[in-house]
């Protein structure tokens, strides 16, 4: 499974970044279910960003060859901790980590490309990075 290989690689990289913490394995399904209930119409869909509910606010940002993480860093508060759900090519996230937006950006930059969603513990928002070089925002970003 692609996402399990990605998850193993990401776990190894996460251990090198002091501000990144692996979420306990039993917490990933809890966060994923909370997020899916808030935003995803078809949780079994391979790409959640392609199966969003119609009644949630969304915004799409094509970043092309630009740095998506620079955009994300401008949208989120610097000092707050967020959760990175590693979705990759599977409907069920392989795992999750938490950290500041800067720490998560460092982790993402130090791994090969994978699909993910950044959210908070209450699933009030989500930022997806898709394999089309598009960021999709859902919900209300924290201020």
Image: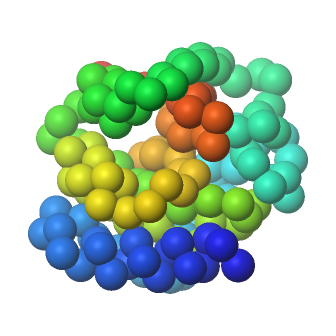
Q: Residue at x 31, y 52 (%)?
A: 109
Query: In the rendered view, does 30 fall on the left or right side of 64?
Result: right
Query: In the rendered view, does 117 fall on the left or right side of 47?
Result: left
| Residue 93 in view, yes or no | yes
* Residue 89 falls in image quadrant: bottom right
- Residues 41 and 8: in front is 8
- The quadrant the N terminus occupies is bottom right
Residue 55: x %, y % from top left: 77, 22
Q: Residue at x 84, y 52 (%)?
A: 45
Instruction: Tell me if residue 133 comes above or below residue 5 in the rendering.
Output: above
Instruction: Tell me if residue 72 comes above or below residue 60 in the rendering.
Output: below
Q: Residue at x 15, y 41 (%)?
A: 79
Instruction: Tell me if residue 117 comes above or below residue 27 in the rendering.
Output: above
- The quadrant the C terminus occupies is top left
Instruction: Tell me if residue 117 comes above or below residue 133 in the rendering.
Output: below
| Residue 122 in view, yes or no | no
* Residue 14 falls in image quadrant: bottom left
Residue 24: x %, y % from top left: 43, 80
The chosen color scheme is rainbow
């Amino acid at each position: 499974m692609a996402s399990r290989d990605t998850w193993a690689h990401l776990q190894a990289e996460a251990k090198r970044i002091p501000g990144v913490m692996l979420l306990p394995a039993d917490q990933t399904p809890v966060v994923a279910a909370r997020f899916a209930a808030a935003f995803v119409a078809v949780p079994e869909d391979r790409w959640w960003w392609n199966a969003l509910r119609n009644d949630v606010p969304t915004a799409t940002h094509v970043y092309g060859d630009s740095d998506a993480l620079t955009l994300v860093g401008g949208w989120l508060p610097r000092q707050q901790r967020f959760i990175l759900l590693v979705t990759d090519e599977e409907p069920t996230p392989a795992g999750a980590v938490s950290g500041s937006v800067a720490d998560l950006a460092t982790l993402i930059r130090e791994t090969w490309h994978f699909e993910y969603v950044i959210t908070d513990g209450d699933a009030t928002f989500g930022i997806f990075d898709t394999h089309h070089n598009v960021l999709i925002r859902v919900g209300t970003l924290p201020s």
